Amino acid sequence: MPASITVTSLSFTWPDGSPVFEGLDVAFGPGRTGLVGVNGSGKSTLLKLIAGELAPADGTVRVAGEVGYLPQNVTLDTTLRVDEALGIADRRAALHAIEAGDVSEAHFETVGDDWDVEERALATLGELGLGHVQLDRTIGEVSGGESVLLRLAALLLRRPDVLLLDEPTNNLDLYARRRLYTAVQSWPGVMVVVSHDRELLELVDQIADLRRVNSAARSASVEGGGGRRVGEITWYGGNYSAYEEALAIEQEAAERMVRVAESDFRKQKRELTDAQVKLARRKRYGQKMWDQKREPKIVMGARKRAAQESAGKHRIMHEEKLAEARERLDEAVEAVRDDDEIRVDLPYTAVPPGRTVLTLQDLGLRYGARVKGGFELRGPERVALIGRNGAGKTTLLRTITGELEAESGEVTAHVPLRFLPQRLDVLDGERTVAENVARFAPGATNNRVRARLARFLFRGARADQRAATLSGGERFRAALAALMLAEPAPQLLMLDEPTNNLDMASVRQLTTALESYEGALIVASHDLAFLGSVGITRWLLLEEGELREITPETVGFPA
């Protein structure tokens, strides 16, 4: 039987009662599938259910073939040897024992038919750019990005029929990402990959779009009712670019349908109102005739009963038409995506062209990296800071902010600056979104804070959510709002891997916010598609302990 995944009537609820899926049906066959959806839609949860790490509340998950799963947060015991992490330690030890002359039957049973396991392991490590990693080294001696690739290498050595990848490029530098792209392109079986990495999603064969908003969600917030349908997947053939094109056409048609449905709804409301007016007139006329007793009582009584019957039918007919029109409008509105964009006006962040923003002089960083000679950032420049994992990019940014003390040399910031770290720990989880922003802008009134937060899509009660309860994308948006609305306004903004764990909608929102930002920008990132979207003007490479300027072509980015 060919490898496949079949999910039938799947339901899953978190211990706090929050439903993730109710009655989800989906099947994945051969080929590479990109599973996309907004933060919180259940993508990672679905992979865990398929991998058997979570148990469904109801329904079934059937997998034909062996499953290999690479989770979003890879944690490996730092004391493990590389061959143990790859799952080949026993076979490797048995091989070495046989080569040394020990012909115990147990060794032959351990090896089985896998006589070239060590050669395959070394070849796989080489293909992933880990040829320098020796099998006898420990995990504690490799970087975080290398540990992700080691986990992937272990999966490839197992040759599973089904491969599940959850945000596999999050902690990988540019070089490691390209190795992973090659491995993905050559994968022969069933693959389901959750990712916000545009380049990776360009390599898939189809897109599965997971949404969890029900058809009555929007109207329910207005009307106070509506059912809940949690978890639906829509399929799109082709890679992410093809998906975007299809979605744009779909959204254009959906917006037209909303306009038609709104027009029909207004028409039905008018007709119901007109009918009610006519019925009221008839009732007044009938009452007048009754009062004046112009006709026999029995005739007037029969006429009154007939009028009431007719009025009731008329009212019911128009109310039913209005309800049908509302339902059509709800369905049309649901088909239109909620693609709200962050809209900010930050005039005080502007930096005049040519003004010196940042100066580094003979800077020695902790852990050995250096900035030789002088480096100057001027005007509203946008700088991409790239380099391998562990090269010292985060250390450099934290030294510029003053969080870390320089080993030698000088750092001079000539304008107010703010830093958004990978961990988003600028937020106090126990405070609300509004309270967090107010901490950074103590001079702003509550109304001013809320008005500015609305532009970051925290409107009304959303501004009163505790930071600890926010989704990944919401938490990022709140942290960005806190920094960009800070007083004094930051004229130098530094971001460290800002797109990690963000869905594509949140990445677009970030890009929109940065378009409005008029100050200088330094972004440490391996996400070339994102860097291209924010108008980078200079590229800096931190490599082998030195910072140097490079051309965009050096990293494979068009000039």
Image (tube, rainbow, N blue to C red):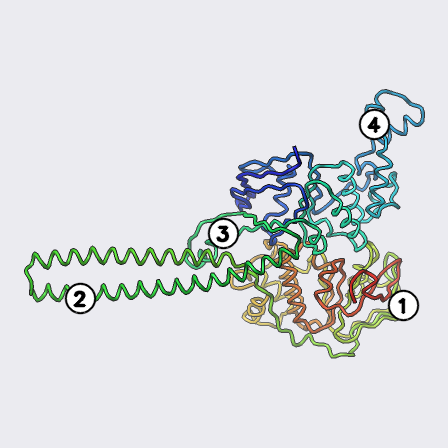
Identify whether 355 is placed above or below 437: below
**Which label belongs to residue 362?**
1
Label 3 belongs to which residue?
214
Identity of the amino acid at label 1?
Asp
Label 4 belongs to which residue?
111
Task: Compare marks 1 and 4 and give the one earlier in the sequence.
Answer: 4
Of badges 1 and 4, nearer the viewer stands: 4
Task: Compare marks 4 and 2 and give the one earlier in the sequence.
Answer: 4
Label 2 environment density (alpha carbons within 10 Å; few <14, some 14–19, many ≥20): few
Identity of the amino acid at label 4?
Val
> Left or right of 375: which side holds 528?
left
Identity of the amino acid at label 2?
Arg
Task: Compare marks 2 and 3 and give the one earlier in the sequence.
Answer: 3
Identity of the amino acid at label 3?
Asn
State the residue at coordinates (86%, 61%). Answer: 365
State the residue at coordinates (78%, 74%). Answer: 357
